[in-house]
Amino acid sequence: MSWITTLTGQQFDLLQPRASKVNPLDIAHSLANLCRFNGHSDRFYSVAQHSCMVADLVPEEHRLTALLHDATEAYIGDITRPLKALLPNARQIETHIWHAICARFGLNPALPACVHDADMIALATERRDLMPPDDTPWPCLAGTQPLTQRVRPWSCEEAFHRYQMQLLNELTNNNRRQAIARHRANAPSKPAYLQEGRHCA
């Protein structure tokens, strides 16, 4: 058995993920109930809230990708960086799921640099505000400064509603941007009456 049952009743196969099985409600619900840092923060802090923070730090055109950059965790959980490095198969499974998510929402699987940078800024801020004091350097945060404002963790319910609303809003905006891009790609470069072989009456 390689599938899990999601909130909406989908049988999501981890080894053969399909875009048609990816549901925004499943992602929002799971990430809102999933605690960052494998539950070792001093207070509950959801992956959904982390994703909203990252989305707030990137340009508008990349907010949907930022909101979904950890959406694979809705299906495989929040695997810590050290464990992921020890389990190459986990990375491969995660990559396949990410591609299914991107196919579902019309995203480029290549993560923009601004999303990666925002992810690290969020991580640095979360470490400062939510993790036990520790002077041991985290190599991934070298050169990254946390935000000046401090993190106020949301409840599961607040995280779900905020994430879901922001996700639906960005999905709508993304669909609009794609429709405009398609229109521009298909539109004639000149008005019809100036096209070759066309003349004004």
Image: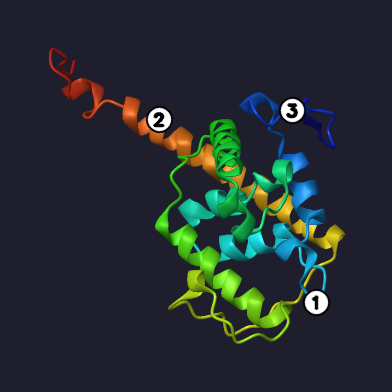
Return the residue found at the far front.
Answer: 86
Name the mark on residue 2.
Answer: 3
Name the mark on residue 42.
Answer: 1
Residue sitting at x 62%, y 66%? 53
Q: Give the image location of residue 76, x and y in percent.
A: 71, 43
**Residue 59 in sight in this render:** no
Would you call the spot at circle 3 few (<14 residues within 10 Å), some (14-19), or many (20 or more)? few
Q: Are marks 2 and 3 in contact (CB under 8 Å)?
A: no
Residue 178 horizontal side relative to residue 56, left or right: left
Q: SS for tag 2?
A: helix
Q: Are marks 1 and 3 in contact (CB under 8 Å)?
A: no
Amino acid type, label 2: Arg
Q: Nearer the viewer, mark 2 or mark 1?
A: 1
Q: Give the image location of residue 150, x and y in percent.
A: 67, 82
Q: SS for tag 1?
A: loop
Amino acid type, label 1: Asp
- Disc 2 target residue: 182
Residue sitting at x 42%, y 53%? 112
Q: Give the image location of residue 21, x and y in percent.
A: 70, 27
Residue sitting at x 85%, y 37%? 7
Quarter of the image for the C terminus: give it: top left
Q: Give the answer, above or below, for where 112 lies relative to 107.
A: below
Would you call the spot at circle 2 few (<14 residues within 10 Å), some (14-19), or many (20 or more)? few
Amino acid type, label 3: Ser
Quarter of the image for the N terminus: give it: top right
How far apart marks 2 and 3 lie (CA) works out to: 38 Å
Mark 2 or mark 1, earlier in chain:
1
Residue 183 horizontal side relative to residue 92, left or right: left
Q: Nearer the viewer, mark 1 or mark 3?
A: 3
